[in-house]
Image (spheres, grey):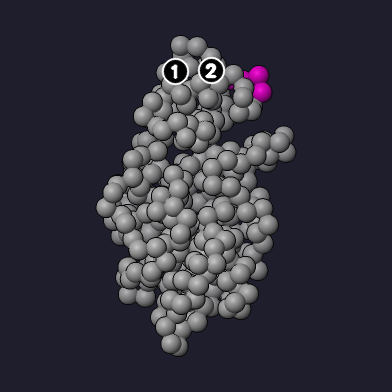
Amino acid sequence: MQTPPDDFAPPIGVPEGLAPGLRRIVAPNPSPMTYRGTNTYLLGDTDLAVIDPGPASSAHLDAILTALHPGQQISHIIVTHTHLDHSPLARPLAERTGAPILAFGNAEAGRSAVMRDLAAGGLAGGGEGVDTDFAPDETVGDGARIEGVGWALDVIHTPGHIGNHIALGWDKTCFTADHVMGWASSLVSPPDGDLTDFMASCARLQSRRWDVFHPGHGAPVTAPHDRLDWLVHHRLARETAILETLSSAPATARDLAEAIYTQTPSALIPAAERNVFAHLIDLHGKSKVSATELSVNAVFSMT
């Protein structure tokens, strides 16, 4: 995690123009995991796409609906992933507007085999919490194109933060949700998060040219490829630190988090522990570490 910049202080619940045909409304759910709150995006001039309606909040529902100008309507509700700060308001918004909800799938969609096994063994998700009740009206897979009046979005499946995570390409703009943010590195918390998938998704985004990223939290990322490079380097540096620490003695994910995340507030150490565990799963898959069992409380050692 990084220390958030102090210069992003948007008005909560007030639509702000970001580009022609694009506005952002920040939800009233600030926290150490969500920064100032969840970014909800309104795309279009007449028939609007709402990207990530946000948490269960009557105030935020009202803010979205009152943001509509005369002659505008909501035609699509698009959910990038099923964490509780992004998806729960989708159904109430659909009931008020009649717009369909589009997403990659439910809370378990897109999970890798190793994460399915961990979930079956009882490992629960951490971090922002998962919207287990979420069910889209329409599923959209990788490579799909969502089209409305005057706009079109390319669906890019970007698992890593969670298996059903998607990014949305709008020409050279990308709505990256929680995969790439400017204020912090993305949480990867098994069994929802998969670091192996996360790194592959970074490579997918790196393969296209982008001008700006609009994330799920925080300000626009105006140097997107630099940010992707930083994310990859950050993860590789974490991997190196984990391996160097393990070279001294076997350790648990919590031991490693406390040894490595020395500048992280104590309240965020559980999230750091999940991040370390994600690295350990990835390293286990690469046969660089071993454990008697693949669990968050296991003792890991170098192979």
Q: Badge 1 is on which residue?
A: 245
Residues 95 and 221: in front is: 95
Left or right of 45, for residue 196? right
Q: Residue furthest front?
A: 59
Instruction: Say what amino acid the circle numbered 1 marks.
Output: Thr
Residues 223 and 203: in front is: 223
Q: Which residues make up the magenta segment? A: 288-293
Residue 158 shows up from this direction: yes
Q: Is residue 149 above or below residue 250?
A: below
Any magenta on residue 190?
A: no
Q: Is residue 157 above or below residue 235?
A: below
Q: Position of residue 291 (x, y in %)?
A: 61, 20
Local secondary structure at mark 2: loop
Q: Position of residue 187 (x, y in %)?
A: 48, 42
Q: Badge 2 is on which residue?
A: 251
Instruction: Say what amino acid the circle numbered 2 marks.
Output: Ala
